[in-house]
Image (tube, helix red, strand yellow):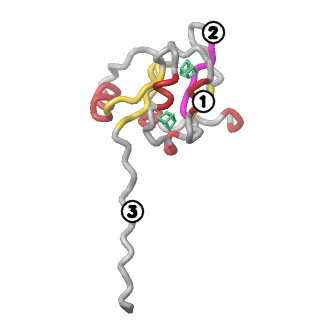
Amino acid sequence: MSMVRKPITPKPPRTREKVLVILQEQCKQCMLCIEFCPKKVLCLTDIYNRKGYHPVTACDIDACVNCEFCERICPDMAIFLADRDEAEKAFKAGALQEGTVIPEFEGNSPKEDEK
Ligand code: SF4
Ligand code: SF4
């Protein structure tokens, strides 16, 4: 048995290849994405969109694992994962359509009970 201790290598920081994008004007508050997200990333806002629904946001975007369950389950294509670089370019250029939220670039939205 070796008496030499193996060096402890810190894990590299987790990077997500894609970013979560939410089209809040398309959200119909069905809550399927909230229910199916395995990491409890998503929650409802208390704002109203033009359809009169409370759209989804990310209350804990750091927990997102890019699994795409939310994208697959959403009946209204209101939530999806996008290429990080392209999304960042559009975000910085202000080229996102109205009601588009990219929580990772904007910081986490506060949870309802923290407001
Ligand atoms: S990609 Fe997966 S972990 Fe991230 S918000 Fe969607 S369902 Fe949740
Ligand atoms: S599944 Fe789609 S429409 Fe339903 S709450 Fe989530 S984002 Fe909104």
Where residue 19 sits: x, y (%)?
Answer: 39, 34
Image-based side of 111 in relation to 18, left or right: right
**CB of residue at label 1: within 8 Å of ligand 2?**
yes
The part of the image, by quadrant, that contains residue 89 is top left
**First reached walking from the N terminus: tag 2 or tag 1:** 1
Please tell me in which quarter of the rendered image ligand 2 is found: top right
Q: Position of residue 106 (x, y in %)?
A: 45, 34
- Image quadrant containing the N terminus: bottom left
Identify whether 18 is placed above or below 26: below
The kind of residue tagged 1 is Ile
What residue would you read off at disc 3? 11
Task: Pick whichever of labels 3 and 1 is earlier in the sequence.
Answer: 3
Disc 3 residue: CB within 8 Å of ligand 1: no
Q: Start and end of the magenta stretch?
A: 53-58
Q: Is residue 15 left or right of residue 60?
A: left
Q: Are marks 2 and 3 in contact (CB under 8 Å)?
A: no
**Residue sitting at 37 percent across and 19 percent down?**
96
Residue 41 located left or right of residue 72 = right
The residue type indicated by label 3 comes to Lys
Instruction: Name the secondary structure under disc 2.
Output: loop
Determine which residue is flagged by label 2: 52
User: Does the residue at mark 2 contact the one at mark 1 (Cβ under 8 Å)?
Assistant: no
Residue 34 image label? 1
